[in-house]
Amino acid sequence: MNSIKISGLVGSSEYDAIADDSLKDEDNAAWVMELEPCMRDEWIERIGWIRLIDRLAENELVDSGSAEFRKFYSGWKWLLLWGRVKSGCAYQDVLTRIAVRWFGASSTPVDRLSLWSWNRYLQAIARYHGHNLIVDTLAQYETMLKDLGGTYFQVLPFLAQEQWQAACYFGALDQFFNNLRDMQEDAQQGICYIPSEVLNQFGVTREEMIQQTACQNPGYPKMMQFLLDRYLTELRQKAYPLIMAEDLHPSWAILRDWSMHRYHRIERVFRECNFDYTQFPQRYWSEVQQDLPILIAQVRQQHGEGHRPTKRCLNRNTAMMPPALTMLSRNAARVAGTVLNPPSLSGQESS
């Protein structure tokens, strides 16, 4: 159906690494291209805004002379203060589209919530993108997950107001898995997001994580078992309302199921690597490259067979979700089942 890829429409950058941004965006959102055009355009626009911010912030991280994110943030704060875009400011076209969406007289309560979440997301990007970032406690780590991933998901289109908080916790879960996936990439930039209290508990140092020698420390696998078997289970519990929701907008139902399939893949490959984050990227992205064509082919086939085109965009929760993601839904249900029956830890009952 669609030969154009999502990465080509949201400004994905490519660089000399296994896990380039283009493949990340396909892994996250290739399904968007199979939506009805009017629905697809809404998703592409929001993902494009978020991808722009991520790219600008990452550029500042690797190039101390770059100030592009700060230029955008300055223009946003002007818009937030005065309700209009400053003439001649950087990224005026993007800010104008945002103003049209969220600052107009016809804005809805959900639009105003999106505006609030977008502002919180920019604040989080400014706060957490830095070489010297240290997260002290698990509580602070979870705040970071919600400030980054949670607000990211709350900015996405077609989210019902009553599912706002649930989306925040699901976004936090998404950010956890992104951090797990990118551990080596972050270490190469001098970044370690694992809280100091967790590192200290298992006798692992931040320097070992950044220098990529942590796997030689006997405490490292125990630390990762704690994060994946105990902390991740608690995080899933908080995301449970959205994981098991039955009244999501069709596009959100696909996002949820696709994401749960991705989380399952990340965790499985990470465990198969015995938590070795230096081996994980090559194995994971190789599997993604093999997996994506199969998933998209199934989506296209079943979408074409089971979905009847409509004259207007489907934008109500009563709309039918395309049947293409039955397999992914089963994966989501299987992973969500761990919420009800969390694994025991070291032969003891889970708390």
Image: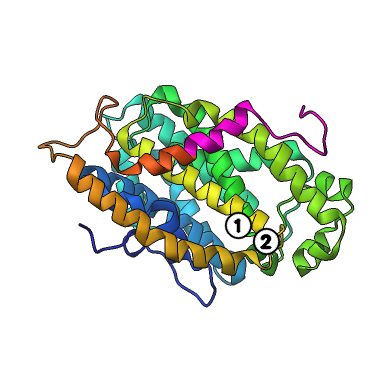
What residue lies at 65% left-to-right and 62% top-to-bottom? 186
What residue lies at 74% left-to-right and 59% top-to-bottom? 132
Quick one: which residue is furthest to the front in this view? 347
Q: Quadrant of the N terminus?
A: bottom left
Residues under numbered marks 1 and 2 in contact, where contact means CB atoms less than 8 Å apart: yes
Q: Residues within 10 Å of mark 2 (few under 14, many from 20)?
A: some
Vertical arrangement, residue 184 with respect to residue 17, above or below: above
The amino acid at mark 1 is Val
Vertical arrangement, residue 35 with respect to residue 295, above or below: above
Residue 282 belongs to magenta span: no
Task: Please tell me which residue lies in front, 162 or 215.
Answer: 215
Measured as percent of width and height from the top left, residue 182 is found at: 61, 59
Is residue 96 visible from the viewing direction of this image?
no
Residue 334 belongs to magenta span: yes
User: How many badges with numbers are in the image?
Assistant: 2
Identify the disc placed on residue 269.
1
Measured as percent of width and height from the top left, residue 46 is found at: 36, 47
Measured as percent of width and height from the top left, residue 230 is found at: 73, 37
Between the C-alphas of marks 1 and 2, the distance is 6 Å
Q: Residues within 10 Å of mark 1 (few under 14, many from 20)?
A: some
Q: Is residue 309 left or right of residue 228?
A: left
What are the residue bounds of the magenta stretch? Answer: 332-351
Circle 2 residue: 273
What residue lies at 19% left-to-right and 40% top-to-bottom? 307
